[in-house]
Amino acid sequence: MVLSVWRAATLARGCSLAFMLAFDLIVDDYDTSGSLSPGFGPHDVSSSALCRRAEGLVTWDSVYFTRIATHGYEYEQTHAFFPLLPWLMRALAPLFGGGSCGVAISGLAVSNAAHIASAVALERLGTSILNDEVLARAAAMLYAFNPAAVFHSAIYTEPLFAFLSFTGCLLLAKRRKNSACVAFALASLTRSNGVLNLVHLAFDFWRCAFAPALRQARRLFSGEVTEDGDEDVNGHERAVARVKRRRVLVWAKGLATASVVFVLRCVAVLAPTLWFQWMGYRTFCLGGGDPNAYYATNPRPWCASWRPLPNIYAFVQEHYWHVGFFRYWTPKQLPNFALALPALAASAHAARAYVKGTDEDAAWVRKESLRPFMLQWCVMALAAVTVMHVQVATRFLSVAPAVYWYLVRVGANEGSGTRRMRRVVSTYCVVFGLLGALMFPTFYPWT
C-alpha cells in the first residue's frame, strides 16, 4: 500500500510530538523557566496531565507566541513576532478549555494541522509547477519528514506560513490571482519573509502581461502586419495609420490596466506588514493605547529613524536579538555555522547548478516555471548566512518549495554518488529531527 502524503505528514507529526513529549518527561530542563506558563506564573499542580504536557512544550519563541496570545503586544520586543498565529491561538483557546492550557494546546493544534495541510498543498503545487506527479509526491514526503520537524510541531510560525505560501503559489498557478493575493497577505501577517511572495507575483506579471506586451510592441512599432488586409485599407495610408493608432491605444490601455492591477496586488500583499509596523509606531511613538501617554512624550529612538520608514521590526531584531549584516560572523559562532552547514551547502549546490551547471539537472533548475522559486530560495539563503542568526537557517529554509524539489530531482539520478546522497539526506533528516525533539522541549539551545 502506497502511503499518501497527508497520512505520511500525520505520521511524522505524531512521531515528532511523541518524541518531544517523551524527552520532556525524562530529561530535566536546561533552563527551568521553560516550565513556567507564560503570563500565568508556575504550573498549577492541579492542572491536568494534558495541560502540563502541552505547556511543557512552550519553550523558546513559543513563550512569546503564547504571551502575545494571552496579553497582546505588551512590550517592544514582542513585535519581532507577527500576529496571525497568536490571533488563531486566542480564538481557538476556548475550544481547549481556555487559560494557558487552552492557548498552548490550540497553538500545537494549529501548527501540526497547518503542517499536514501544507504537505498536501506542496504536493499539488509540485504537480502543477513541475508537471511530474512522482517528483512532486517525493518532494512532499521529504517535506513531511524535513529536518526542522520540531519547529513544525511546536508553536512556531513555519508550518502556518508554509501552508499559506504554498496555497498562494498553487492558486497563482491556477490563475486564481486575487485568491492567491489573499493567501500571500495572510502569509505576510504570519512572518516577515512573507513579502518575498511578491517574487511570484512579479514573475507572473512578467510572464502573463509584460513580456507579451513587449512582443506586441515590437510588432506594432516595427510596422509588422499580423492580419490580412492590414497593410492597406482601400489603398488609403491614413486609414492604415488610424488602424495602427487604434491598436497602439488598445495595447497601451491593456498594459496600463495590467500594471495597475499588479501594483494593487502587491500593495495588498504588503499591507499586513505595513499595518503591523504602523501599530508599533502608534504605540511607541505616538502613545496610542497608553492611558498615561508616556510614549507620546518619550518616543523610542527608532521613531525618528527612517529606513525607509520607522521600522519597529528592524529595530527590535537589531537591538534585542543583535541581528545585522555580518554581525554573526565571529569565532564563537562557528558551532552555529556548523549546525546550519547542511542547509547552506544544499543551497550553494543548487546555486552552482543554476549558474554554472551544464548537465540535465542544471537545465531543469533553469526552467521558467522554477525561476521564482529558485530566486526566493537564493534570497532566503543569503539572508540566513549574512544577516540572521545562522543556526535558524534549517527551519528558515524549510518553507522553500525549491529545496525539496531540487533535492528530490538530484536524488532521482542513477549512480553510487546519488545513492550515497540519498542516504546522507535521509540520515540527516532523522538525526537532526531527533536532536531537535530532545533539545527544544528541554530548553537546550536549539532555535
Image (tube, rainbow, N blue to C red):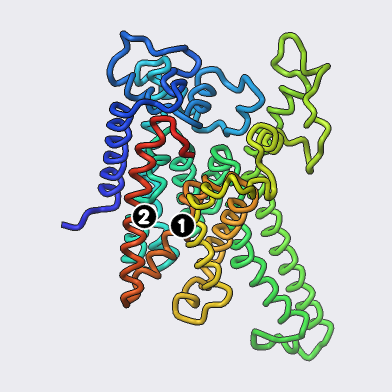
- Marks 2 and 1 in Cβ contact (< 8 Å): yes
**Could you tell me the amino acid type at mark 1?**
Pro
Report which residue position mark 2 lands on: 428
Q: Residues within 10 Å of mark 1 (few under 14, many from 20)?
A: some
In the rendering, at what x and y percent does residue 387 appear? 65, 48
Residue position marked by numbered label 1 in the rendering = 342
- The foreground one among 420 and 39 is 420
> What residue is shown at x 38% (from left), y 57% (from top)?
124
Q: Residue furthest bottom?
A: 235
Seen at 58% across and 51% down, the residue is 384
Task: Decide if residue 150 is on the left or right side of residue 187.
Answer: left
Image spot of residue 178 (x, y percent): 55, 49
**Image-based side of 288 in relation to 10, left or right:** right
Instruction: Please determine whether, in this image, residue 196 is positioned above or below residue 79.
Output: below
Q: Name the residue nearer the viewer: 232 or 316.
A: 316
Question: Looking at the image, which is closer to me, 342 or 11?
Answer: 342
Q: Is residue 401 above or below residue 366?
A: above
Amino acid type at image mark 2: Tyr
Res 437 label: none
